Image (spheres, rainbow, N blue to C red):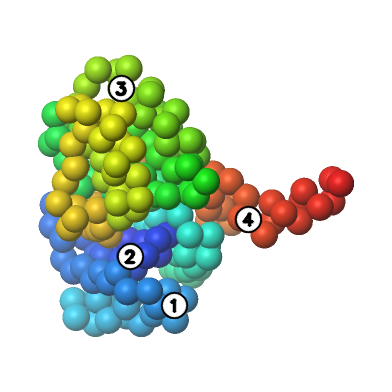
């Protein structure tokens, strides 16, 4: 089975084609350019480099958010369109879980995060287990200090991951002390191959998406939409 994985949910733009036991091809960039323009040429390029036709694909996976409102939407819409056109299963994977995979084999809790402004983060608590990455607490938007208090009370070492870590690292160190661990900067960028590995597990468990009804996981309304709704209620 060959699976195409797409991640446009944050700064990193990533595309990979994998089998369950091999990364056949993978492209990633972390340059602030328009994902909507660059995604499909990247998909075409990786397939061309692999000398593959789209008919050889068995499934499509996408990072479903949270993340950039526009970025998440680009990836989800593109993946839905490809899965629909090719009549393939569609798998949506948490963008935070994809990042958590960078902490594979860490002997404790893993807390991937994206900055959500105003002292908030998008975060989830994960743990590496015998079947891959396991969810300890579901993704949510939360005040960082509340998340840290909860993590500290669990009494385990915690690996923090994410390209926004520098915004919050001082607060994390002050609160968590020796419980806090940080990976090198290269581990803070998600890999589309990890997205593919997470998707294979979901496929085995029958966790696929309805290609027509599948929507991104923003965890909160986009700021413009929130302001519009607030104005309607005044």
Task: Give the CA distance from mark 1 to mark 3.
Answer: 39 Å
Mark 3 or mark 4, which has the lower sequence index? 3
Mark 2 or mark 4, which has the lower sequence index? 2
> Is label 3 in a helix, a strand or a loop?
helix
Circle on res. 123 = none
Pinpoint residue 39: horizontal percent, then vertical percent: 39, 75
**Label total for image:** 4
Nearest to viewer (mark 2 / mark 3): 3
Circle on res. 152 = 3
Q: Which residue is mark 2?
A: 12
> At 77% from the left edge and 48% from the top edge, which residue is drawn?
230
> At 19% from the left edge and 42% from the top edge, which residue is drawn?
182
> At 40% from the left edge and 78% from the top edge, which residue is drawn?
33
* Mark 3: few/some/many CA within 10 Å (<14, 14-19, 20+): some
* Mark 1: few/some/many CA within 10 Å (<14, 14-19, 20+): few
Task: Give the CA distance from mark 2 to mark 3.
Answer: 30 Å
Nearest to viewer (mark 4 / mark 1): 4
Task: Give the CA distance from mark 2 to mark 4.
Answer: 22 Å
Q: Which residue is mark 1?
A: 34
> At 27% from the left edge and 81% from the top edge, which residue is drawn?
45
* Residue 23 vertical placement versus 151 (above, below): below
Between 44 and 128, the one nearer to me in the picture: 128
* Residue 145 vertical placement versus 97 (above, below): above
> Is label 2 in a helix, a strand or a loop?
loop
Q: Which residue is mark 4?
A: 223
Task: Give the CA distance from mark 4 to mark 1.
Answer: 20 Å
Marks 2 and 3 in Cβ contact (< 8 Å): no
> Is label 1 in a helix, a strand or a loop?
loop
> Is label 4 in a helix, a strand or a loop?
helix
Mark 4 or mark 1, which has the lower sequence index? 1
Between 119 and 213, the one nearer to me in the picture: 119
């Amino acid at each position: 089975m060959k699976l195409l994985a797409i991640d446009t949910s944050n700064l990193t733009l990533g595309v990979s084609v994998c089998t369950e036991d091999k990364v056949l091809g993978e492209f990633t960039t972390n340059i602030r350019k328009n994902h909507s323009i660059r995604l499909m040429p990247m998909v075409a390029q990786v397939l061309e480099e692999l000398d593959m036709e789209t008919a050889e694909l068995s499934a499509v996976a996408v990072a479903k958010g949270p993340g950039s409102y526009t970025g998440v939407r680009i990836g989800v819409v593109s993946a839905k369109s490809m899965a629909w056109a090719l009549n393939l299963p569609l798998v949506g994977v948490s963008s935070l879980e994809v990042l958590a995979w960078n902490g594979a084999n860490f002997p404790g809790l893993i807390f991937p995060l994206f900055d959500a402004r105003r002292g908030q983060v998008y975060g989830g608590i994960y743990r590496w287990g015998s079947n891959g990455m396991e969810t300890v607490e579901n993704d949510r938007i939360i005040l960082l200090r509340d998340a840290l208090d909860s993590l500290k009370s669990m009494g385990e070492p915690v690996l923090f991951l994410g390209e926004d870590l520098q915004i919050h690292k001082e607060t994390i160190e002050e609160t968590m002390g020796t419980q806090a661990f940080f990976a090198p900067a290269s581990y803070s960028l998600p890999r589309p191959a990890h997205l593919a590995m997470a998707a294979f597990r979901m496929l085995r468990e029958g966790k696929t998406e309805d290609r027509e009804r599948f929507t991104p996981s923003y965890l909160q309304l986009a700021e413009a939409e929130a302001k519009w709704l607030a104005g309607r209620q005044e």
